[in-house]
Image (cartoon, rainbow, N blue to C red):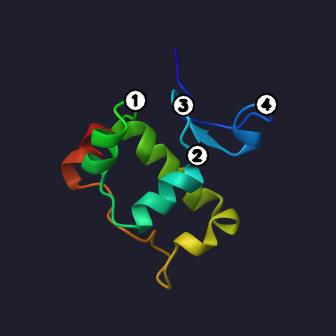
Amino acid sequence: MTIKWVKSDPLVMNGEPFVYGTRLTVRRLLELRASGYDVQQLMTEMPELRVVGIARAYEFAAANREHYSEFFDGNGQLRGPGLTPAEAALV
């Protein structure tokens, strides 16, 4: 079975895209990242998260930049700590 890690359903979270298996929207995940949360902190506080889900949420934001423009800096990079090379290798 292939999991679609970022889902959008008008009956869930008011239609805001969210990470599969959680009640965490992509927007909230980006807010936490911009506040300085790294992947380890996110997964410690929200154990239902998976590295691949976080990575796919960041990819979704990059692909839908017009909806999340406030989370990107002038270089086009997402603000805040991203995945380390070791974490990215897990995806």
Task: Judge left or right: residue 65 versus residue 20.
Answer: right
Residue in the image at 41% along x and 61% along y: 33
* 7 on left or right of 35: right
Q: Assign a secondary structure to mark 4.
A: loop
From the viewer's perspective, is residue 50 above or below residue 31?
above
In the picture of the structure, the residue carrying the numbered disc 4 is 11
**Label 1, label 2: how far apart the Cα atoms are:** 13 Å
Q: Which circle, 3 or 1, is nearer the viewer?
A: 1
The reply to whether dot 3 and dot 4 touch (C-beta < 8 Å) is no
Marks counted in the figure total: 4
Residue occupying image coordinates x 37% and y 68%: 80
Is there CB contact under 8 Å for labels 3 and 1? Answer: no
Q: Residues within 10 Å of mark 1 (few under 14, many from 20)?
A: some
Image coordinates of residue 21 in percent, x first then y, are 51, 27
- Identify the mark at residue 25; answer none if there is no mark: 2
Residue 79 at x, y = what percent? 43, 71
Point out residue 52 in the picture as x, y percentages from the top left corner. 39, 38
Q: CA distance from mark 1 to mark 4?
A: 21 Å
Residue type indicated by callout 1: Glu
Q: Residue furthest front?
A: 45
Relative side of 6 to 33, left or right? right
Q: Nearer the viewer, mark 3 or mark 4?
A: 4
Q: Label 3 vs label 4: CA separation? A: 14 Å
Q: Amino acid at mark 2?
A: Thr
Res. 20 image quadrant: top right
